Image (tube, coloured by chain):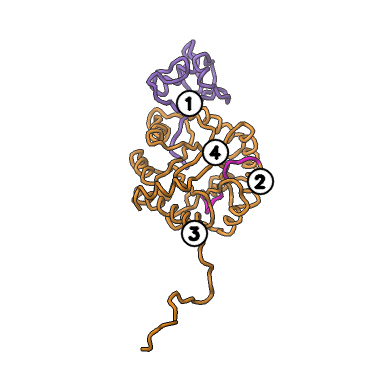
Chain colours: A orange, B purple
Amino acid sequence: MTQALTDKLSQADPFTVAGVALGSRLIMGTGGAPSLDGLGAALVASGTELTTVAMRRYATGGGPGAGTNLFELLLENNIRVLPNTAGCFTAREAVMTAELAREALETDWVKLEVIADEHTLLPDAVELVDATEQLVNRGFKVFAYTNDDPVVALRLEQLGAAAVMPLGAPIGTGLGILNPHNIELIVSRASVPVVLDAGIGTASDAALAMELGCDAVLLATAVTRAQDPVRMAEAFKHAVIGGRLASRAGRIPKRAHALASSAMEGRPDL
Amino acid sequence: MSTIHLNGAPAPLAAGTTVADLVAAVTGRAILPTGQPADGRRLGVAVARNADIVPRSRWSQTAVETDDDVEIVTAVQGG
């Protein structure tokens, strides 16, 4: 697809979240990339306009927190930053991390992640609900990473979340969307944007998320740990656009028996 | 000489040290009294002192005291 065509499509159908219109429905994570240069190239290839970061100690001698190059990389590429609360197990830790992020990065947007344990990395619904309420009261725009539970998703929206982000499968597994029915149910009842977050393995998973009616897709590992991250980033860019178009175009119903698309009338007698 | 805990490790504390001094030492960038870096770029750093956030506007007026727990954080790659 040409750049002009993708630009035209995104202008006609922006992704509006927390009052901001974004030209891409692909939210990228930055975790797992071996180098900042490679990450930058992948982000540009993906067309993303919103990208997550984690908050960690400023490291002086190398390591994940060395320098503020990542923040500057995003600024240089006009990519809005979405700080996350990865690694938080309690609402208290998540609220503190969000406050640090707001102070450091000057944004009140936060991807709220409160996990139950390091083995599953699954969201802890009780702490998540508590943290969402606290952060909304403190003026944050909360992007709540949640289980594929339609009840919790609706509860988060009622508490004031700017977007609900159900998982397709556990973080980093690449298992795709394990319960498409629940994702459809979440979408059908939501009045805030639904972002499919976590579990995406390849382009068709992202297309499926959009076909199920999600407003956007968030992924990191599927790109950063792919053999060719730049090519995979571009694949996701097209998959999200394709899935979105298909979702709006109205697919044909599924049928048990074949249906000829060529008329039998006028068939020559051979 | 007295010490503090800086990002989880013991660090020496000179008399009269402010939060702004620590940020400048850790990031290697000069910090203006406003808390903004002198180079005009974005700093992308936040500070918690004894589990309370110190807003950048108060870095240069906030003295660091013996045994303080200071965390200086920034954005890194993640989910």
Q: Which mark is residue A249?
A: 3
Dots 4 and 2 on the same chain: yes
Q: Quadrant of residue A79?
A: top left
- Residue beneath disc 4: A19
Q: What residue type is labelled 1?
A: Ala
Q: Distance between the residues labelled 4 and 2?
A: 21 Å
Q: What residue type is labelled 2?
A: Arg
> Which element carries disc 4, helix, strand or loop?
loop
Labels 3 & 2 near each other (Cβ < 8 A): no
Chain where mark 3 sits:
A
Residue designated by label 1: B9
The number of discs equals 4
Amino acid bearing label 3:
Ala
Q: Would residue A250 be counted in the magenta stretch?
A: no
Q: What residue type is labelled 4?
A: Gly
**Is residue A166 inside the magenta stretch?**
yes
* Mark in the foreground, 3 or 1: 3
Q: Earlier in the sequence, mark 3 or mark 2?
A: 2
